[in-house]
Amino acid sequence: MNGDTIKFVSRDRLSTPIHRAALRDDRLSWGARGLFAFLWDLPDGWQLCSRHLAQMGPEKKDAVLARLKELVQVRAIERVRRRSENGLLCGSTWLIYSPKIWAQEAPLSPKKKRPPADKEL
């Protein structure tokens, strides 16, 4: 099998509600949190390609790659290279880990004190 596929680690079933900590993990940007939620909902065996992800969403390929890098850094996802029988690289498997394994729920308060805004939204 060529190309990059995804495989879920410790996911109960497709469309399982996402663990709240994944959405509140302040080590991740808002974009990385959203990308994880999107990846978590994909079917097992999906062919993962950053160019295709960029075409499906509002961000360009470089931004998608930056979001994937964030997710790798917190160990939410992992890219495992596959080799053919003769030792040549033939794609990757992306492991998508359950937020129960990696996510750290942050409190619902700002990390830094900010000066008051002129206008509230």
Image (tube, rainbow, N blue to C red):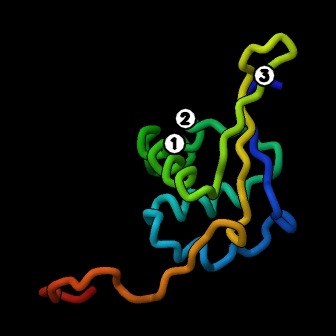
Query: Dividing the picture into quarters, in which one does residue 41 lie?
Result: bottom right
Q: Earlier in the sequence, mark 2 or mark 3?
A: 2
- Mark 2 and mark 3 residues within 8 Å of each other at the beta carbon: no
- Number of residues whose C-alpha sits closer than 10 Å to that of mark 2, classed few (under 14), some (14–19) or many (20 or more): few
Q: Which residue is mark 1?
A: 54
Question: In the image, 48: left or right of 72?
Answer: right
Question: In the image, 102: left or right of 42?
Answer: left
In front: label 3 or label 1: 3
Q: Residue at x 23, y 85 (%)?
A: 113
Q: Is residue 114 visible?
A: yes
- Residue closer to the observer: 41 or 111: 111
Q: Residue at x 82, y 64 (%)?
A: 11
Give amino acid for label 1.
Answer: Ala
Residue 73, percent from left and from top: 53, 53
Q: Rounded to the nearest whole Å, what is the CA distance between mark 2 and mark 1?
A: 5 Å
Residue 55, percent from left and from top: 53, 41
Describe the element under mark 3 as helix, strand or loop: strand
Which quarter of the figure is the N terminus placed in? top right
Q: Which residue is mark 3?
A: 83
Question: In the image, 72: left or right of 44?
Answer: left
- Number of residues whose C-alpha sits closer than 10 Å to that of mark 1, classed few (under 14), some (14–19) or many (20 or more): some
- The disc placed on residue 51 is 2
Residue 120, percent from left and from top: 23, 89
- Mark 2 and mark 1 residues within 8 Å of each other at the beta carbon: yes
Give amino acid for label 2.
Answer: Arg
Residue 115, percent from left and from top: 15, 85
Q: Earlier in the sequence, mark 3 or mark 1?
A: 1
Q: Is residue 102 above or below residue 69?
A: below
- Residue closer to the observer: 67 or 112: 112
Give amino acid for label 3.
Answer: Arg
Q: Rounded to the nearest whole Å, what is the CA distance between mark 3 and mark 1?
A: 26 Å
- Number of residues whose C-alpha sits closer than 10 Å to that of mark 3, classed few (under 14), some (14–19) or many (20 or more): some
